[in-house]
Amino acid sequence: MVNERVMEKLGILADAAKYDVSCSSALSKRENKNKGLGNAKGYGICHAYTEDGRCVSLLKILLTNHCIFDCAYCVSRKSNDIKRAAFTVQEVVDLTIGFYRRNYIEGLFLSSGIFDNADYTMERLVRIAKKLRLEHNFNGYIHLKAIPGASDELLKEAGLYADRLSVNVEMPTEQSLKLLAPDKNHVDVINPMKYLKNEIIGYKEEKKLNYKAPLFAPAGQSTQMVIGATQESDLEILGMADYFYQQMNMKRVYYSGYVPISYDNRLPAIGTPVPMIRENRLYQADWLVRYYGFNVNEIVGFNQPNLDLDIDPKLGWALRNLNQFPVDINTADLELIKRIPGIGYLSATKIVASRKFKKLMPDDLQKMGIAYSRAKYFLAFATPFQLQKDLTSVQIKDHILNSQKSKYKNDFSNQLALF
């Protein structure tokens, strides 16, 4: 049984962890062995969805919300008058095993404030992962925060026991970080990223030569940026993300809309809406760069540094580049088909595979499940079918917006509530 004091800590430290969104077990392939506990292969955590549609969860907590830093955007900053708590190493281990045995969770996401210094905190995080792996033979997913400023030796040991490591860059630019967290700098974040990148590559090469070589952070590393706390444009944010993908081999960059929690004139006032739509657009743009072959400068640029909030980035690009449309779906190459609004990555591959057997027409595309009401403005067929070649970008945009209903759009129905 979990005693009352541990449950009180759990309530405090689980609530404090909710602001960290950089958690996913994607790409981890740690398999169960020696009749141990758990299995991270093919699973996700933090209410993520696996490829077959399963929703899975994790124990997501901070080791402590004590912190030596006073970052204005952080609820755990040292100047904030909140209730503080800290787990012991054994308490986190017991909670993880206990919740796993009850089938509450399938893994652990563990972050932390900074106790006294980076090494002291990182050493405790590593001890927890090490105990789970070696003493309890736990093979479930473990995501650890790599504390900026921790020694390379501790980072290396963390990578041997964790599936994924993450070092949060927090603010998109050095200037913003200095404004809101004067004691921090980007160098302390970039250096451990570089170290982890090199170690991950090195262990992968060793694994090719020796299949018995140990795993090292098999799900790679990730980071998180807070958006909306400062005035960076989407061009700056996506440019930084692209740097992480290209130079750090980052698996994921997460974008977290700032939740106003502080009476501080450097930050948006309490009550300011969380930029949820902007956050969603950044994720969509990020997806286009990683999987659809887009360059950041095709999505945003100096002439348009911010993403449109009323339409998704792919549609925005298409409306700015109508000279590339309409596209003949039966002859275009895969890369161009992926750029058509309303056609996703998998649908594009289905189209290319299907046209080997017959000439595709609108009803064929609709059967494939594409968003034809959107795609039709950018398609051409050998036999004309409601072609919209003469519409301007403004007209196409209006037609599409009028035909869709966003989950973010206010419902102005005058229906009264029953209670």
Image (spheres, rainbow, N blue to C red):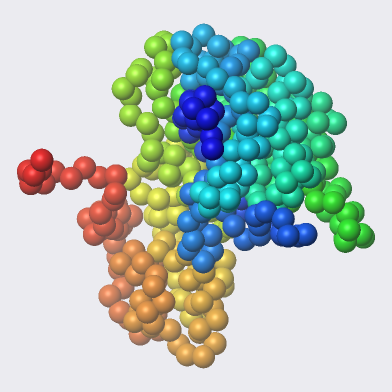
Query: Furthest residue to the right?
Result: 209
* Residue 311 locus on image (x, y percent): 36, 49
Q: How many marks on residues? A: 0
Which of the image's four quarters has the N terminus? top right
* Residue 332 locus on image (x, y percent): 52, 74
* Residue 60 locus on image (x, y percent): 55, 38
Along the line of sight, the residue nearer the viewer: 380 or 130: 130
Which of the image's four quarters has the C terminus? top left
Whether 304 is drawn above or below 358: the answer is: above
Residue plotted at (51% across, 9% down): 79
Asked if one can make out residue 167 in the rendered structure from this viewpoint, the answer is no
Query: Furthest residue to the front?
Result: 1
Asked if one can make out residue 100 in the rendered structure from this viewpoint, the answer is yes
* Residue 227 locus on image (x, y percent): 48, 31
Whether 164 is drawn above or below 207: the answer is: above
Whether 159 is drawn above or below 228: the answer is: below
Whether 395 is drawn above or below 220: the answer is: below
